[in-house]
Amino acid sequence: MISAVNHLWLMQVIFGAIAILGFSIRSNIKGSILIFTSLGGALCWGLYLMFLAGTSSLLLSVFLSAAVVCIYGELMARAYKVPVSVFVICGIIPLVPGSGLYYTMIAYIEGNIVDAMTKMGQTLMIAGTISVAIAVVSSLANIFKTMLRRF
């Protein structure tokens, strides 16, 4: 029997895929690539939830899930002969800390500067972690491609 926690996890992954499908359509992505960008978003959010449950570290979970989705994007981009950014941007959207930005602004508006600075710091760390994961995977992919061309 599937527990309530598993239902919640599965529901979040499905809604992640649906949200990325809408984002992909809005971004003018067409054809079968829509399915794979949606799968990338679902993969990203599912891995994030899994890593967060396993490690209890927000930044490590963000880094690992973003890195895996970037690897997925590199592979799918080669398979479908489209830019890597199509899959990477769509895949990492679930990790973007939009709520952190919202709550930072609310705290500033309410005059709670300490809380706003705390939330802004957390938001910037998440955004920076996503950026580092993209840079690491992109660099490793370029090194790998260069090594393959030499042999």
Image (spheres, helix red, strand yellow):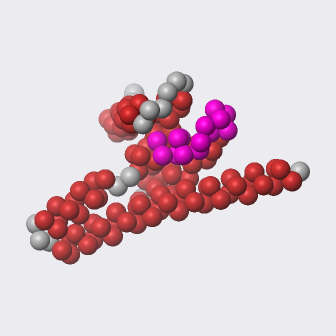
Quarter holding residue 94: top left
Image check: 110 left or right of 102? left
- Rendered residue at 61%/47% (across/down): 71
Front one among 120 and 59:
120
Q: Look at 65% across and 59% down and name the residue there.
A: 139
Q: Depth check: give the residue in front, 68 or 8.
A: 68
Which residue: 65% across, 35% down? Answer: 81
Q: Nearer the viewer, residue 143 or 47?
A: 143
79 relative position to 8: left or right:
right
Considering every residue shown, the one lying at the far top of the view is: 31
Q: Residue at x 53, y 62 (%)?
A: 132
88 drawn magenta:
yes
Vertical relation: 39 (above or below) 68: above
Q: Quadrant of the N terminus?
A: top left
Q: Is residue 1 above or below residue 44?
A: above
Report the residue that reaches farthest toward the left.
110
* Prevailing secondary structure class for the magenta stretch in the rendered image: helix
| Residue 68 sits above or below residue 8 on the image | below
Q: Which residues are magenta?
A: 77-90
Q: Is residue 110 above or below residue 49?
A: below
Q: Examine the rendering and report whether any part of residue 60 can be seen.
A: no
